[in-house]
Image (cartoon, coloured by chain):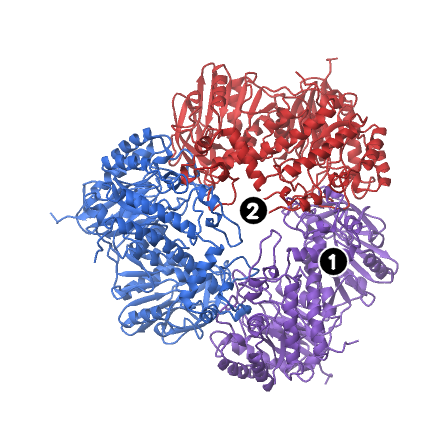
Chain colours: A red, B blue, C purple
Amino acid sequence: MTPRLGMHTLTAGRGLLFGGDYNPEQWPESVWTEDVELMRAAGVNLVTVGVFSWARLEPEPGARDFGWLDRVLGLLGDAGIAVDLATPTASPPPWLGHRWPETLPVDESGHRLWYGARNQFCPSSPVYRERALALVADLADRYAGHPALALWHVGNEYGQICHCDDSAAAFRAWLQNRYGDLDGLNEAWGTTFWSQRYSDWAEVITPRRAPYLINPTQLLDFRRFSSDALLAHYRAERDLLRARTPDTPVTTNFMGLFKPIDYWSWAPEEDLVSNDHYPDPADPLAPARTALVHDLMRGLGGGRPWMLMEQATAAVNWRPHNLPKPSGQLRLESLQAVARGADGLCYFQWRASRFGAERFHAAMLPHAGPDTRLHADVRAHGAELRRLAPIAGTTVPARVALVHDWASWWALDERGQPSDRLDPTDQLLSYYRPLWERGVAVDVVPPSAELSAYALVVVPNLYLISDADAASLTAYVRAGGVLVVGPYSGVVDPRAHVRTGRFPAPLREVLGASGEEWRPVPEDRPVPCRWSDGAAFAARTWTELVRSDGAEPVAAFTEGEPAGHPAVLRHRSGRGVAWYVATLPEQDALAELTARALADAGVTGVLPDVPPGVEAVRRGPALFLLNHGDDDADVPIPHRAEDLLTGTTAEGRITLAPRAVAVLRPLDTP
Amino acid sequence: MTPRLGMHTLTAGRGLLFGGDYNPEQWPESVWTEDVELMRAAGVNLVTVGVFSWARLEPEPGARDFGWLDRVLGLLGDAGIAVDLATPTASPPPWLGHRWPETLPVDESGHRLWYGARNQFCPSSPVYRERALALVADLADRYAGHPALALWHVGNEYGQICHCDDSAAAFRAWLQNRYGDLDGLNEAWGTTFWSQRYSDWAEVITPRRAPYLINPTQLLDFRRFSSDALLAHYRAERDLLRARTPDTPVTTNFMGLFKPIDYWSWAPEEDLVSNDHYPDPADPLAPARTALVHDLMRGLGGGRPWMLMEQATAAVNWRPHNLPKPSGQLRLESLQAVARGADGLCYFQWRASRFGAERFHAAMLPHAGPDTRLHADVRAHGAELRRLAPIAGTTVPARVALVHDWASWWALDERGQPSDRLDPTDQLLSYYRPLWERGVAVDVVPPSAELSAYALVVVPNLYLISDADAASLTAYVRAGGVLVVGPYSGVVDPRAHVRTGRFPAPLREVLGASGEEWRPVPEDRPVPCRWSDGAAFAARTWTELVRSDGAEPVAAFTEGEPAGHPAVLRHRSGRGVAWYVATLPEQDALAELTARALADAGVTGVLPDVPPGVEAVRRGPALFLLNHGDDDADVPIPHRAEDLLTGTTAEGRITLAPRAVAVLRPLDTP
Amino acid sequence: MTPRLGMHTLTAGRGLLFGGDYNPEQWPESVWTEDVELMRAAGVNLVTVGVFSWARLEPEPGARDFGWLDRVLGLLGDAGIAVDLATPTASPPPWLGHRWPETLPVDESGHRLWYGARNQFCPSSPVYRERALALVADLADRYAGHPALALWHVGNEYGQICHCDDSAAAFRAWLQNRYGDLDGLNEAWGTTFWSQRYSDWAEVITPRRAPYLINPTQLLDFRRFSSDALLAHYRAERDLLRARTPDTPVTTNFMGLFKPIDYWSWAPEEDLVSNDHYPDPADPLAPARTALVHDLMRGLGGGRPWMLMEQATAAVNWRPHNLPKPSGQLRLESLQAVARGADGLCYFQWRASRFGAERFHAAMLPHAGPDTRLHADVRAHGAELRRLAPIAGTTVPARVALVHDWASWWALDERGQPSDRLDPTDQLLSYYRPLWERGVAVDVVPPSAELSAYALVVVPNLYLISDADAASLTAYVRAGGVLVVGPYSGVVDPRAHVRTGRFPAPLREVLGASGEEWRPVPEDRPVPCRWSDGAAFAARTWTELVRSDGAEPVAAFTEGEPAGHPAVLRHRSGRGVAWYVATLPEQDALAELTARALADAGVTGVLPDVPPGVEAVRRGPALFLLNHGDDDADVPIPHRAEDLLTGTTAEGRITLAPRAVAVLRPLDTP
């Protein structure tokens, strides 16, 4: 069921959205006219306005200056360019921190973080909240019903963490709500360890700098609280907006696999999901990593179209050494997002700034002006996006689910683990890559997701698991599903307490296997393994001492201490099959394992054979083929088809130059 | 002369001690019964209780809750398991830091360190001291005479450093005691340098964060003070315990070559020496390093048996990537401690925690329960230790002394040195290794030790030396001793003032050599050297421009600027011989040098030939042979002997599998 | 025109100055007599006294103790040794920080920096200033007219930075002076970016720790302010001195390419330029780097002789691993300074300290005493310097100017750049090296310098450029000059705002070229290039997408994306020639480019052929040849000449052993 508001509210009559952040307050008004003209020439149909305008809208406490914004929205509206209007609360003016220093965030060592950059607010500050909401209310009152207003953009890239006294008080309130009383807190935090028992709520603080390893449950709960504290603020702003403009959707821009914020809890509070994503041109895994993030965004929106709120036309300026994008990359990356469900393709930002800390960040209109290679690429891309209007609103069907969980990630990100080299997002990507390479569509889902519609569920790592989620995974297999579970899963409960007994305690029955020791291995010594049918492979970093309790050991360690012990097990359980992987196999072995699990599940990719470097994904009526490699790729295609981008017809096979894209809609055979 | 109290107080009637930290407050009482049963099955005869129980014993200021501890000690006592009862003052409850923030430690930058971990107290805080002593007194009153009480364990792993105002005041009092008046302080600290003269005691502070290199004598005195401040607190607790339980020995657990604490000054304040030691499975030098630490413990106790208070059954969790121990390593390491004088073999901890920052630290009873490989090893080891009862109370005779000094280590650990790559403990290990490899027993001693009983004294580095200690070394040689002195020794006096004139000023007469320049060399360019009888070797990192003033240059540098200058000198002085090493020879050359010095001293190892990787040490009636290598080792043995561990008889030679141990008691020839 | 005061005031009647820092307050008076005797024997004719004597002169607030200094100056004066008397304000006594903690500096995170080291003062502290000036006035009153007083040495190595509230207030005053009103500040800082608009001066602070990238103009202005705040203090001291001793020159010791201080603004406030320089023996580029720094000092003094205030006789002690100097290096380095314009050759310090943080820093008189290799070298060097008396006062003529600017360096040292690997001083050295290797004399000049006298002006990097300086460079070329401009120049204006349009906007006309994209390249992938006449070379790190607007593309990129685009361009403009280098060519290619530009300018080196490793420079009547290599060098010389150092005659060619130096004065042909 599609909710009342969403991307369709925006794309109706507009097709795919194309645009970017627009910061007219940085420029004299004379430039605005040129901007609007150039936007129209480039096919821009939506811009985000006002993200950093608090100090301009409220130049001193309580004052209001909306005149300039009236004129900006008027100009844009007249030109038919829709406005994604931001609440400007991500970056308070200096006067807030100066007059109310308690609104400034404090780090775990007690350092106050000052104005001079951006984001300098404490999420739990009553003063910040009061000031922010007053301005948001006035902003919404003023622009409710404005013809240019199409979307609300609340704040920006939420992620602030604070350890001030206001935050400690809010943390205590959050904990009281979670645990009821001090006994509950002491039990959950395991405060009999290291004499940490709390005798009064007033003693409870955020995890400030301490002499040694801090209580892991305190750390975990502080992460939960920090995400929730920001969410509470987001909701307060959203509620003000919804009350005033019930027909205008509300979003806030996510940042992909961003650790501080649990987007599973945030996404249901939005009308549509939007994301900022900046692949690193120096990262050889960027194409798969980006696809994974896009699939996460689709998952956060329950499969519905989403919006790429920020990407870069070329190099960013916040890495130490910022590589540019090769020719064609701008278009390739943008179309990759379309292929994976994006209906909006926006950039940070429209016009490159002359001043400020991001003036060397690429923009749609560079310092050198419109008569440049880069701006020509932007215009060409804006034009071709119009040809993809039929894609808007369509979905990407998937029979494979990949499980990701923020709480588990947070819990594992703790100093006192067997190893600091088990990164859940690295494991996520490792298991994702062979699926992506085969053109198998994947939904990224939370552990609590309804799984029955999936043929295969992959859990690369779920260190923390609740009883209910463990039961859900078990039931899924019993009912006929295929499950793959990676190492060091099912270790702790939601309080981060170890689940005692052989591991993974809550899954060992469905897996038909159990273990007793985690055994990290030296990084420079891969562990030799062998499939039971003969082929050898290597694993690394991590092994477990596991035995079969009924599962078939399909691969085993072959040398040294673990020799003979199972490395991979497969267990028929009920009507389904469960796999357990007790190590980190090298990528080729993970591809082999994936192939076997896909065979168990009866799932195939969108094409029988996808050349290396090519991404193949079906969205709505079209098959997207994207060549991320540096060589021509020759791709066999199943049907005679029309390339929506070019209008040409293809049949049998299609050759893609490096960074080329085809969007093939099947034609009737002639 | 054996003091009235010591390890013998504990081992009498019990044999070697076997057990670990036991934290029943983390578990429901139902588990306690199972614990005691499993302990008995595993041969456990002593457990440490209460280390982190302050918050449980004093749930709010002034309250007392001893009931649970009564039950724990009752259960253990009834089962015949002795209790090492801890004063719980290492980790104050949150209420202490919350109500009295001045008890929290402050780092050199002014950051307060909060509760949430452990160890959060200022050693000089009057409030902390008052609260801690009140509880200790009540604890001792309650359990004085309890049949289970066998040993007091004061605090835990002392090492706190603090820069708060209370600490500054205590530092001033310590300095007044040391130097009398401000003139004394100004002279000792050399405050005419950089305009640092103090005109009032109130100006004197701990070495807080400063713009550049801090006064080295201030730094050195602060290290001395920090060790002494904790010692004063330890003594205050100990005195309370001694007054109440004069027949129960008192200890606190050391941490080997732990930089912050001068254990030479601490050990005489204990009834027995105990130590926590965690060899790193990733460290190829761990066997020798561990042997050195064990010899240090024996030295701290004046040669008497000591106790391994904490070791790990398998992997720890506080390194970044924690390798497990190979099979047999648990036993090998524990028996290595026995070989070098330990009469107690304890672990952290009995049962693996479910929660808290150390729940992934290996224990005697793992999460997976008693039916595991690991617990089987624990039981087997507990059983075999009973066979070594005849070893308890015996000593390890040594004719070689190795000098280590904390003050010298601290003084050299200063930023403004010729090089930061001269680590005294690295040098200590380098000189120790050839002795260890040959099966030569070594006592680690302080520079003030009585040396006359030793045939060879090795001083790898003594950067700081007092006049008295220099005179003692000189007299030792004159009287017939053999002395080896490593580079950069004798450089400063106890105030860290340079001893002017050719170096090493206070030793140059006995060494018959003197120098004028320290010349660090590039790390990637070893310095070629040659023995006067022809063989070449390489040195590294450090050279000195030294001349013979009568000594025989037994090795010289052969290339570059230092070519022709002596690298090693040997001087007959009085009835003895003194060696000076003016560089860091590679390990093989150090072995050659050691062989020559041993020949001078007429000292040989316990076996004529020890295969690589095998440790050979004689303790009491037995010869311990431990194979640390990865291959079988074939060891010739001098007598027909019985292996105490197995009861079998060996003659001629014995083959040791990797990680195997033999404890051979000579038999009469048949 | 030579100013009234300068090095000539000192060298008149003395020849070259030779000496060092002398800290008699660290020694009993009995040592002073020996010091003076040894100084005379070593040819010392000037010492610096009193740099760290505040606590000795003012043992408590307001007290004065000059007696000891009277005796020191008396002794030195009687021995004919001139005194460079320091104001002791670099290192306040502990009582200042203790009684007035607001005089202590605060770092950007809010940490107070305490006494215990040195330099612990806030440059903007009114209390510090008042106390410092009162003492300086009394010092000058007392020693005005003293026969030994030859030079004033104000403070020491200025470089303090502070973020305290006093500093914030001073920063605001500085900004008010610069920008007039808040509108001016808001415009210059671009505060419409990220909502940073200031509504009240009280809100403006120094760039304290913030959550993300700080406003780059705020950072740049804070650097300007920090340099100016110290300069204001220096000037206040200097004015007191000048008023009392109008005939005694005043200096303060610089630190070469020291980032925090804009020496271009400082040097005109001195009577003579002095510098502290410590080449790293581990740095293979040290000879060229040192020559560059010496040329900078000459440039700071407008071509007049300068003084090497501090150098080391051997190893320093403030690097982590301090290599000694090879034999002959002491002399080679000192004579290199003479060759490049130094008339004073002084060391830190005369006698090695026994205590304090610098006691392991080499000195003229080492701990081991006068009967040492090192002191013999010092004496020999002191003696031979007398033979160079004819050199004193002479100049080093140069036809090439190299542009360096602190503000541009500061502006580029910002986190949000396209790359953090474009270091202006690295680029400076890269362009300097080929000139140095050819024996081409170079003046280092600021961008505002009068350029008409130069045949070639090299601008390795001028990221920030003012309109006036851009116009000056343009006019210079039009009038017949040859200009070389390195990449990423002309990017921002003095507010650090990007100059929009094709880059480098203010220079593109004179360069006949313009660009639109900066394109950093992966460090491990050099970019192939080719000269238009055929030879290939590689570039690295950085490329630009540039087109010719009239310039001749003399080299182009040959592979990958930039293939075919120009890498180096040469443009005839007016009567001159302008080169633009759009990448970082490898060193050989830079040598080729330099050769071509020198040919355009008609400039040659002092010798037709300089062997590798040999430095050749003409000063006054003499040709200095210095062999920095490890092999003998055979140098053809143009004239029959006398070596001033040896008195021998040379003709045709001369062979220099490693580290040998010749100072050749032409003789009439026989």
Q: Position of residue C579 (x, y in %)?
A: 79, 56
Note whether residue B273 is visible: yes
Quarter-wise, where is residue B458 in the image? bottom left
Pick the front one: C559 or B603: B603
Please state, as top left, top right, bottom left or bottom right, where the N terminus of chain A lies in the image.
top right
Residue B473 appears left or right of B505: left
| Label number found at residue C174 | 1
Q: Which residue is mark 2?
A: A110
Mark 2 crowdedness (10 Å alpha carbons): few <14, some 14-19, many ≥20: some
Q: Residue at x 68, y 72 (%)?
A: C251
Pick the front one: A558 or A182: A182
Measured along the vertical axis of the image, is residue C278 above or below residue B236? below
Q: Residue furthest left?
A: B670
Please state, as top left, top right, bottom left or bottom right, where the C terminus of chain A lies in the image.
top right
| Label number found at residue A577 | none
Image mark 1: chain = C
Pick the front one: C447 or B356: B356
Q: Position of residue B408 (x, y in %)?
A: 41, 62
Measured along the vertical axis of the image, is residue C100 above or below residue A308? below
Q: Residue furthest bottom?
A: C78
Give, as a three-letter code, the residue at label 2: Gly
